[in-house]
Amino acid sequence: RNWLRYRANVMTDFMRRVRAELDVVAREQGREPIHLTACVLGKVDDNMYFGLDTGIWVKEGLIDTPIPYSPAPLAMPIASDIWSDPGQVQPFVDMVRGTNCGLSMNVMPRDLGPEEYRRMASMIYETGAESLFFWDTDARCTYQPPWAALRRLGNRNEIEDWSKSGEPDLGPTVRSLSNLAGWNMEAIAPG
């Protein structure tokens, strides 16, 4: 463990320089501090293995928001590797507790159904995570059924109410538009 911490000093020193430079730029521009977010691996030990001492980054205020990517080993998600257990999220919640850092969890995998996304969001919020993050949103949000649920996952109250009411069916996710102001929208133009 000492060797891993020693090795992580290289990246931690880099993060200190980045934080210092961002603070200088913010002062020069007379603006609020510039927030720094870091996508990290989904297990604290995996981060240390790769030289990322996220605990020190949070403790020293070098970053404002860590985003754990996936609980899969070495962040290589497959369908079964999702944030399914509060115990997977808790080490990061504990890491940011009592600091000025927020916590945003990356929601994986990309191919969940609307109800599954809501269940995961509910569990993540219940652990104390502040927000959700989505990698590859274009791959899962372009007119696909989950989009109707994904776009509402930031509304914590709605997610909580849905869970408390027994997780009712979300209903149709797409509504066909066949007529708009007298125009037939079902016609397909050539070309």
Image (cartoon, rainbow, N blue to C red):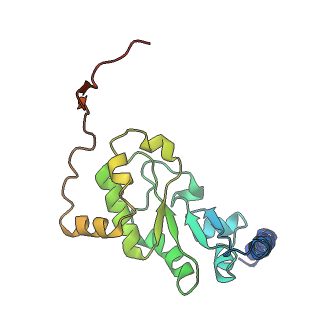
Q: Is residue 113 visible?
A: no
The foreground one among 51 and 166 is: 166
The picture places residue 124, in percent across and down from the top left corner, at 40, 68
The foreground one among 157 and 188 is: 188
Q: Is residue 105 visible?
A: yes
Q: Say whether residue 17 is left or right of residue 94.
A: right
Which image quadrant: the N terminus?
A: bottom right
The foreground one among 145 and 189 is: 189
Name the residue: 25% across, 34% down: 176
Name the residue: 54% across, 75% down: 102
The answer to which image quadrant residue 186 occupies is top left
Q: Say whether residue 117 is left or right of residue 53.
A: left
The foreground one among 135 and 31 is: 31
The picture places residue 161, in percent across and down from the top left corner, at 24, 68
Name the residue: 44% across, 43% down: 140
The picture places residue 180, in percent across and down from the top left corner, at 26, 32
The answer to which image quadrant residue 185 occupies is top left
- Residue sitting at the far bottom: 98
Query: Is 80 rendered above or below residue 16?
Result: above
